[in-house]
Image (cartoon, rainbow, N blue to C red):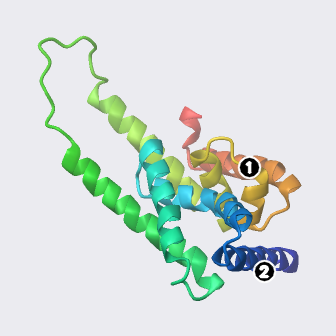
Amino acid sequence: MNTGNASERQAAHARIGELFGAAREGDRGALDELVKLLTPLLWQVAREQGLDRERAADVVQTTWLRLLGALSEIRSPVALTSWLTTVTKREAWRAGEKRMAERPLPELPERLTEPSPPPEDTVLREDQRARLWAAVNKLPERCRGLLRIVAFVHRPDYGEVGARLGMPRGSIGPTRGRCLARLREQLLAYGEGDWL
């Protein structure tokens, strides 16, 4: 393990602990910085549960509201990130269940205006997507985390991404490029490159 990365992670954890302590004491600026620092992680967790952007935004907002009500209950700053992740997952599951319950039965149109794509196109698209994420999951942990954030967060703040992944801000772009190149090589090596 790179000691620089470990010390950066420790510094990030220490900073989260400081901000959490200050937020518990009523420091609004510390709470705002904590939200800014950890929101990309919560977005990733919510999107990994299969939520669309709108529902993921609602879940992340609800998670932060729940934290406001539980600031005094969380005893250790070390437990904060785990607590936020757990609450985000639970809220995402609730949102997914609610969406399923709210989904109306489809109405049959009087006349089809646009033909649906052939089933084989849908199957191929889903297969490509599954192969792509399977290839992403074979990448090193740092690449997986970075590519998931880039894929699910619109215009991610490199400062936040760096803090989350324990990387210097200036290395995120080049690292992303190397990760994408490795992903492309992996897809091509397994004959998956016909759709790139």
Q: Residue at x 51, y 52 (%)?
A: 133
What residue type is disc 1 on? Asp
What element does badge 1 sit on?
loop
Question: Quarter of the image containing the C terminus?
Answer: top right
Mark 2 and mark 1: Cα distance apart in space: 20 Å
Query: As displayed, is residue 84 above or below residue 45?
Result: below
Cβ atoms at labels 2 and 1 below 8 Å apart: no
**Which percent across, then down, holds residue 141?**
65, 67
Q: Residue at x 58, y 55 (%)?
A: 136
How many labels sit on residues?
2
Could one spot residue 140 in this view of the protein? Answer: no
User: Is 80 displayed left or right of 92 in the figure?
Assistant: right
Q: What residue is pinned by disc 1? A: 157
What residue type is disc 2 on? Gln
Query: Which of pointers 2 and 1 lies earlier in the amino acid sequence?
Result: 2
Residue at the extreme front of the image, as rendered: 26
Badge 1: how crowded within 10 Å, few (<14), some, or many (20+)?
Answer: some
Could one spot residue 145 in this view of the protein? Answer: yes
Badge 2: how crowded within 10 Å, few (<14), some, or many (20+)?
Answer: few
User: Is 193 displayed left or right of 3 in the figure?
Assistant: left
**Which percent across, then down, holds residue 195?**
54, 33
Question: Quarter of the image containing the N terminus?
Answer: bottom right
What element does badge 2 sit on?
helix
Q: Which mark is residue 10?
A: 2
**Which percent across, then down, holds residue 39?**
61, 58
- Picture quarter containing residue 162? bottom right
